Structures are given as structure tokens and as C-alpha cells.
Amino acid sequence: MRKDEINLHDRVSIKNTNYEVIGIDSYSLTNYLNNKKQWTSYTLKSKKSKLWLVLGVNDKPLLWRMTSPKSIKSVKEFHFDFEFSGIANIEFRGDKGFSTPKSEIVFLKKGNKYFVIEKFLGDIFCFLGEPMAHPLKITKS
């Protein structure tokens, strides 16, 4: 899947749940190894939930769900990922939600599962993510 295949207000169907793309965030991160990494995060909203589809971190699309900072206790066996941890500049299209133009990101990884801590101007959010194991259907707006 290419990043240019998904646009604002497109409909995305995942596991028989329909979402609308309400935001697109383009990340440009300088990691702790002083390398640049880029990826795109799509904010998807259904009638009952919100999740994030991320392209450019893994060879497969990743699905992220927000979780409580207390859940970090459940990821003690995860390892720090230097490649995707650092300071990010973010460009927004659509609903930016709680995002700000800069964030500090800590990526933890175990196999193909991820735990991310992202800090925006003092607000800290945590996400659990993993590669999509099911097909994604896109309906253009």
C-alpha cells in the first residue's frame, strides 16, 4: 500500500468496521542515532472508536490503538528502538487532534508488536501497535 492511496475523508474498512480518514499526520523524525525517519499516520474514526493506521515504519501497515500510560507495565519485555525514537516534526492535514508540530517519541518493540510513548507539549499519550493481519478496503471520498 502506498501513502498516496489514502486521502482525507476516504472510507476505510477494517474487520467489518467502517472508519473515516479524519486526519493525516506526516512525521519527520531525527532519531537518537541522528538519522532521519519519515512515516505517515492516518487518524481513523468510526462511530464507536478511533485508531491510527501508520505507513512507513514497518513493511506492513501498522494499526495503533491508544492505551493508558499504566499499560507500560505490561511491556517490560519490550526493547528500546533507537531507529524510531527521537524528536519529530509533524505536518497536519485535517483533524490534528491533540498533536502539536513537535513531539518526543519513544518506541519500544518486541517482535512485531510496538508500544509508543509520545509527548506533545507536556501531554503524554501511549499507543499499542502491530502489523495489520487482515485486509484493508479503501473507498474514495
Image: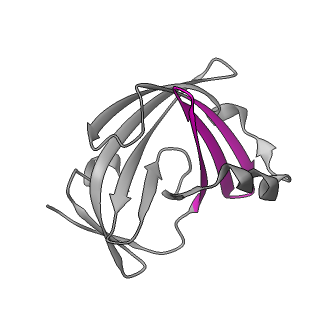
Percent x, y of residue 114: 66, 53
Where is residue 13 drawn, in percent x and y? 33, 73
The colour scheme is: one colour
Instruction: Find the residue positioned furthest to the left.
Output: 141
In the image: residue 41, left or right of residue 128:
left
Which residues are the magenta region? Answer: 104-130
Vertical order, 2 against 35 (above or below): below
| Residue in front for this viewpoint, 5 or 104 | 104
Question: Which picture quadrant has residue 47?
Answer: bottom left
Q: Is residue 75 above or below residue 26?
A: below
Left or right of 79, for residue 65? left
The residue positioned farthest toward the bottom in the image shown: 16
Which of 47/17 is in front?
47
Q: Residue furthest top?
A: 34
x 34%, y 62%: residue: 45
Q: Position of residue 26 (x, y in %)?
A: 38, 35
**Residue 129 placement: quadrant:** bottom right
Q: Residue at the spot x=63%, y=45% of the render?
A: 116
Q: Nearer the viewer, residue 19 or 138?
A: 19
Q: Residue 38 at what x, y percent from top left?
A: 47, 33
Q: Measured along the vertical axis of the image, is residue 87 above or below residue 64?
A: above
- Quick one: quadrant of the C terminus? bottom left
Quarter of the image for residue 21 reads bottom left
Q: Main secondary structure of the magenta part?
A: strand
Q: Is residue 9 magenta?
A: no
**Front residue (pair 32, 46):** 46
Residue under the point 37% across and 39% down: 25
Verify whether residue 122 appears in magenta: yes
Q: What residue lies at 33% left-to-right and 40% top-to-bottom?
A: 96
